[in-house]
Amino acid sequence: MSDGRRDGGVAGWPVEFRGVTESLATTLGPNDLWNVAALGLHPPESDAPDCDEAADGVVTARTWGNTRTRRNFHRQGGGYVQFTRDPVDFVDATLSIYEIDEPLLDSADAWVEVEVEQVDSGESGGTEWEEWKLRPRESGVERETVPTVTRGFPAVVEATVAASRLDVPEYDQTELRERLDYFEEVGRKCGDQRVRAALDKLAEYVGE
């Protein structure tokens, strides 16, 4: 992989997982650019037979469809998982082909280099999925912050989920549009300038 990563050296995840954790993953493509895509992380169930993997830092994630992340996972056997609070990066990663020269985003608060292993596959609503185990190899923390809670950033994340499902027959399109309108209203009312910029880009991507 590229040597463009920042100094790390610590194995393990730099965060505590609580439910599904939203992240951005970068994977190296055949064009030598790093593709950025959203990736939901699931910790092992505490009562699962292999729950001892929690101590080894193993989490799981699913790729949906024939995405660049899926193909690059198969090709490279790993990538980088990044934790960021930047809403524009989330919109670009979810709704566009977003590629960068180096593996780490400037907005990443923390990152983990992972190796991946495909462990399951299936189909849901006409879309094929693959499940992966992610094992941390190296990690780093770029900045620590005192968390503040606003409704703006979560509204952007929820809006990207709804937007990514547009034109998927399994989902009610009217309901998705209503959800987009609602989360845009929340984001513009409660978010900062960066949230509003993310919502502007989202509207461009979905043709509003």
Image (cartoon, rainbow, N blue to C red):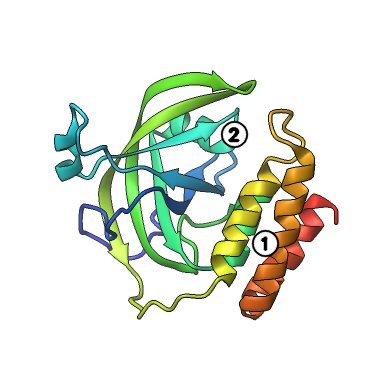
**Is mark 1 in CB contact (under 8 Å) with mark 2?**
no
- The percent coordinates of residue 125 (x first, y second) are 62, 23
Observer-nearest of 81 and 186: 186
The type of residue carrying mark 2 is Thr
Residue 202, visible in the rendered structure: no
Q: Which residue is mark 1?
A: 183
Q: From the viewer's perspective, tell me whether residue 35 is left or right of residue 2.
A: right
User: Badge 1 local density, few (<14 within 10 Å), some, or many (20+)?
Assistant: many
- Quarter that holds the C terminus: bottom right
Measured in 3D between alpha carbons, the distance from the residue under mark 1 to the one under mark 2, in whole angstroms, is 26 Å
Residue at 49 percent of width and 68 percent of height: 85
Q: Residue at x 20, y 58 (%)?
A: 10
Location of residue 48 in the rendering, given as x and y in whole percent from the top left corner: 22, 30
Residue at the image point whose x is 65% and y is 70% from the top: 187
Specify the amino acid type for callout 1: Phe
Q: Quadrant of residue 133?
A: top left
| Viewer-nearest residue: 54 or 102 | 54
For the residue carrying disc 2, how many other residues have a C-alpha within 10 Å: few (<14), some (14-19), or many (20+)? Answer: few
- Compared with 97, 169 (above or below) is above
| Earlier-in-chain disc, 1 versus 2 | 2
| Location of the N terminus (image quadrant) | top left
Q: Is residue 2 left or right of residue 140?
A: right
Place of residue 102 in the rendered image (x, y in percent of width and height, measured from the top left): 49, 57
Residue drawn where x is 22% and y is 45% of the image = 57
Q: Secondary structure at mark 2?
A: loop
The spot of residue 161 in percent (x, y) is 61, 48
State whether residue 122 is above or below residue 17. Answer: above
Return the mark for residue 151: none
Q: Which residue is disc 2 drawn over?
A: 67
What secondary structure is found at the residue carrying circle 1? helix
